[in-house]
Amino acid sequence: VLKDFSPFGGNTKESAKFLDKLLKTDKKRPSTLIAIPVGEEKATRSTRNLNNVKSMRIENLNLQDLLGHRFLIIPKDSLETLETIFK
């Protein structure tokens, strides 16, 4: 759970460095799902070319997406949205 998505506001290289630091990997990045809230188009663009990383809008998440990845990255203020989707 992240406070905000500012680390994903840059380019793909910066997003890759941030993810590797966050996930503590220096080799192959584990499968990661990034749940992107409305208004964070920069995060979508900066992560769409990364290996083993799938980014999608929170409103479009389903159970198969959640279970198919080892890690989920989501902003803190979007947890309520996730709860309403899966109630």
Image (cartoon, grey):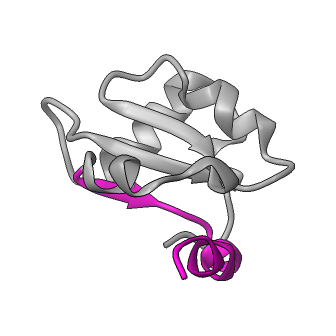
Front position in the image: 19 or 30? 30
Residue 76 horizontal/vertical position (percent): 62, 77
Seen in the picture, residue 23 relative to 83 is either above or below; the reply is: above
At 78% from the left edge and 46% from the top edge, which residue is drawn? 40
**Given the current orientation, which residue lies at the most extreme left position?**
27
Position of 70 with respect to 42 (left or right) is: left
Residue 77 horizontal/vertical position (percent): 70, 78
Q: Is residue 41 visible?
A: yes
At 53% from the left edge and 38% from the top edge, which residue is drawn? 55
Residue 52 horizontal/vertical position (percent): 30, 29
Magenta region, residue range? 70-87
At 72% from the left edge and 41% from the top edge, which residue is drawn? 9
Q: Is residue 23 visible?
A: no
Residue 25 horizontal/vertical position (percent): 19, 44
Q: Which quarter of the image is occupied by the C terminus?
A: bottom right
Seen in the picture, residue 43 relative to 60 is either above or below; the reply is: above
